[in-house]
Image: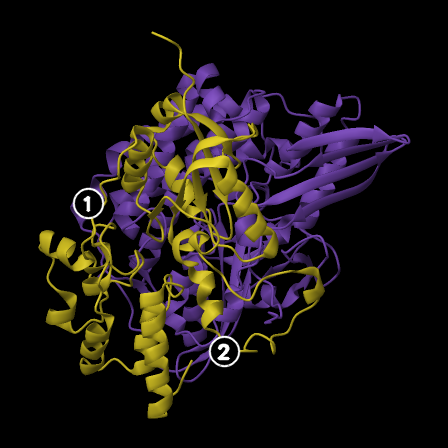
């Protein structure tokens, strides 16, 4: 049998909270097996060692918020065989994409010391807005079991098996009493991608959409239902604009609700 | 990623992309004629403008939104946010809710300290690039680290519903109190973890420590009868004793060119240090018995001013976390109701808690409709930045006989001594966003 070099894995960080990279280190039981199966060529949060590319697989956490980072992701793409983005920041711009929804000049009035020291773009954008991405793993934060599945699948050259149904379906599977129907608690479960394990309804709160919209999400119908339950348009807009406001589906629904709030003359954010 | 060199009698230590820290920073030290001329901890991680987009959000959204500042210490953000909003609204959750918060926080301390002690910091003392190398050299210590970290995550999952960005925390308390049975299941693993944490104290106490002492002004929470974590007054080693709101007024933040994190000082212009060394020095009398005994055996005096030995104090705090968590688990009664009702209206308030890496305070102005008008969040790493730079200076001056590669490593280690969380520190600028 010939000696074959193990595939190389690199982990990169852009604007983010580090939580999705941490999910990799949170695979306590699998960490050594993973470190044996691949050569970890770059993972600054874990190691001083750095090996120059090319890399077989790159995992990218975080969104692009500076001109330098827009350049850096191109170089990483060029050096990577498969490029996988992990988490809401990398796949939709993350919580920091709330700046994208800010009205022109909204941040201008804020007191600052020396803005000339900082260069920052006016938007926070997903990695896929800058370079082609081979797979996007959703979640704020991602689920570590799904992360392992994605890594394993890429090493084996197959598609990852990640569910594409709703939190609502997962919640029914857990036999949790529906917080929306039984208690009128605003819940994004019907339009949110499964993956978390339907955690929020299990503690009696509504889903806040931290895995982003499921394919074909009918957010307009849910918004109408939430308003009928008595949620005000500004609060409904807030519900759709947290960790996936940079996503087209949730972001557009938030903007629609805001406009409705303005038209209704209610207090806007 | 690392470069150093000599030119014109000047020696430069430069580290691009500091490793084994959370977030993105670099380090540059210039030595001329045997003297350190310049130390620059440059933080270039892009800001995320939390304080700007918090305005107009419901105050009750602050715990979930600010958790996303840091994936390593989300509970610290949730706890400080809750404390500040509750202070503003005049809300005082029951002692049972306070205990459950402390249990959740014990989980985060355990998870974060086990990560730093075993995976991020110990490799420096053993000459390893990373924990994978360490696992080959010291498999038992590596396994113990993972086991402690995993239990920390399990405590967070039991109480908070999720290890990264818990879902069960709300202003006023919790959405759901975990059942007696769920909490009791933690007792066995915590008992075993207490022994593991004690073994880790003994392990790290045996490392070689560079002979560096610093004259710190320490700042930490203090609360009679308890090692500080989720509440307390703010105290300093030079006599300060005030409320979180009083402390917030004393802290002056300065924006310097090399950093997207603000540098903090007290209003007398002098910097200070928060974190394990500060908590230990100001609360040594509150250490539970097994931790006090472990400290004695590790040779820690009542105050530790060698930053390289912070790893021993961090390990000791894992003993505190296991011991405290066990006590809380044993006397656990689900708080009923699990949450206090949030009153309508607004107000101004401050909240401070002890994140694993140091004091974290939030202040909020909340308008009469319950929305945030103004937010200020001051994370530990931004408070510690000035002391980290002066530590690097001291460490380099004490180690000029080392070769370039070793001197570079020593400087990096001096930064890692404080477990900096750069992702946390950078998100607090009020900056004009230019739109084109």
Assess disc 2: are there few (<14), some (14-19) or many (≥20) residues with their C-alpha within 10 Å of its C-alpha: few
Give how far across and how far down residue A196 sits, in percent.
25, 50
Residue B5 x, y percent position in the rendering: 79, 29
Q: How is the image coloured?
A: by chain
Q: Residue at (18%, 80%) from the top-left corner? A: A229
Residue extending farthest top: A1
Disc number lying in front (2 or 1):
2
Residue sitting at 36 percent across and 48 percent down?
A: B164
Residue A118: quadrant of the picture: bottom right
Dot 1 alpha-carbon crowd within 10 angstroms: few under 14, some 14 to 19, many 20 or more: few
Q: Chain of mark 2?
A: A
Q: Position of residue A160 (x, y in %)?
A: 26, 39
Q: Is residue B147 left or right of residue B434?
A: left
Residue A223 figure quarter: bottom left
Which chain gets the purple colouring? Answer: B
Q: Is residue B216 visible?
A: no
Cα gap from disc 2 to disc 1, whole angstroms: 46 Å
Q: Secondary structure at mark 1?
A: helix
Please give the label number shown on residue B21.
none
Residue A137, compared with residue B315, is above or below; it is below
Query: B400 or B324, which is in the foreground?
Result: B400
Mark 1 lies on residue: B182
Determine the chain carrying the residue at label 1.
B
Asked whether B342 or A111 is in front, the reply is A111
Q: Is residue B246 left or right of residue A21?
A: right
Disc ID at residue A103: 2
- The front one of B351 and B284 is B351
Residue B33 occupies quadrant: top right
At numbered mark 2, what does the secondary structure look like: helix, strand or loop? Answer: loop
Residue B65 higher or lower than B14, as above or below: below
Chain letter for the yellow colouring in the rendering: A
């Amino acid at each position: 049998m010939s000696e074959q070099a193990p595939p190389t894995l690199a982990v990169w960080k852009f604007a983010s909270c580090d939580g999705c990279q941490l999910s990799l280190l949170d695979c306590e039981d699998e960490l050594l097996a993973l470190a044996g199966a691949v050569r970890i060529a770059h993972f600054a949060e874990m190691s001083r060692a750095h090996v120059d590319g090319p890399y077989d697989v790159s995992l990218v956490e975080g969104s692009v918020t500076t001109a330098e980072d827009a350049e850096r992701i191109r170089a990483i793409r060029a050096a990577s065989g498969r490029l996988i983005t992990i988490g809401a920041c990398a796949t939709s711009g993350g919580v920091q994409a709330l700046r994208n929804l800010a009205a022109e000049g909204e941040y201008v009035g804020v007191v600052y010391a020396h803005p000339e020291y900082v260069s920052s773009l006016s938007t926070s954008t997903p990695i896929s807005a800058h370079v082609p991405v081979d797979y996007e793993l959703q979640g704020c934060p991602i689920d570590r079991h799904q992360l392992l599945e994605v890594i394993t699948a890429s090493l084996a050259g197959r598609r990852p098996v990640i569910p594409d149904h709703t939190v609502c379906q997962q919640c029914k599977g857990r036999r949790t009493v529906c917080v929306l129907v039984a208690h009128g608690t605003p819940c994004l479960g019907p339009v949110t991608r499964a993956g978390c394990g339907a955690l929020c309804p299990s503690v009696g709160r509504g889903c806040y959409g931290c895995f982003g919209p499921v394919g074909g999400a009918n957010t307009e119908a849910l918004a109408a239902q939430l308003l009928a339950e008595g949620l005000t348009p500004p609060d409904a807009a807030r519900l759709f604009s947290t960790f996936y406001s940079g996503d087209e589906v949730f972001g557009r629904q938030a903007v629609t609700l805001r406009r409705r709030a303005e038209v209704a003359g209610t207090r806007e954010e | 990623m690392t470069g150093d060199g000599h030119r014109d009698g000047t020696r430069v230590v430069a580290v691009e992309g500091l490793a084994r820290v959370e977030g993105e920073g670099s380090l540059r030290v210039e030595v001329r004629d045997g003297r350190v001329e310049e130390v620059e901890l440059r933080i270039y991680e892009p800001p995320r403008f939390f304080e700007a987009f918090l305005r107009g959000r419901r105050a009750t959204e602050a715990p979930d939104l600010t958790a996303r500042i840091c994936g390593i210490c989300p509970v610290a953000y949730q706890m400080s946010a809750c404390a500040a909003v509750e202070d503003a609204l005049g809300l005082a959750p029951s002692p049972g809710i306070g205990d459950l918060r402390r249990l959740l926080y014990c989980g985060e301390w355990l998870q974060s300290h086990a990560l730093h002690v075993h995976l991020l910091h110990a490799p420096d003392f053993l000459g390893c690039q990373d924990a994978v190398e360490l696992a080959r050299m010291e498999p038992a210590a590596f396994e113990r680290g993972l086991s402690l970290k995993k239990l920390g995550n399990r405590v967070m999952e039991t109480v908070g519903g999720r290890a990264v960005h818990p879902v069960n925390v709300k202003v006023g308390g919790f959405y759901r109190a975990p059942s007696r049975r769920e909490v009791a299941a933690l007792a066995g693993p915590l008992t075993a973890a207490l022994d593991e944490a004690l073994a880790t104290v003994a392990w790290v106490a045996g490392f070689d420590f560079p002979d560096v002492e610093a004259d710190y002004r320490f700042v930490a929470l203090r609360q009679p009868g308890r090692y500080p974590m989720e509440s307390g007054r703010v105290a300093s080693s030079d006599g300060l004793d005030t409320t979180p709101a009083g402390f917030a007024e004393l802290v002056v933040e300065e924006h310097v060119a090399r950093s997207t994190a603000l540098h903090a000082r007290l209003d007398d212009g002098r910097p200070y240090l928060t974190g394990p060394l500060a908590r230990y020095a100001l609360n040594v009398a509150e250490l539970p018995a097994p931790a006090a005994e472990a400290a004695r055996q590790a040779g820690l005096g009542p105050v530790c001013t060698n930053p390289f030995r912070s790893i021993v104090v961090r390990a000791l705090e894992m003993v505190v976390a296991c011991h405290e968590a066990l006590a809380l688990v044993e006397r656990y009664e689900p708080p009923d109701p699990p949450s206090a009702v949030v009153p309508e209206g607004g107000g101004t308030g401050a909240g401070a808690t002890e994140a694993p890496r140091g004091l974290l305070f939030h202040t909020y102005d909340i308008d009469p409709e319950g929305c945030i008008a103004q937010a200020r969040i001051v994370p530990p790493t931004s408070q510690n930045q000035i002391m980290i730079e002066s530590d690097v200076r001291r460490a380099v001056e004490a180690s000029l006989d080392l070769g370039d590669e070793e001197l570079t490593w020593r400087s990096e280690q001096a930064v890692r001594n404080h477990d900096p969380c750069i992702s946390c520190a950078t998100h607090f600028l009020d900056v004009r966003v230019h739109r084109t």
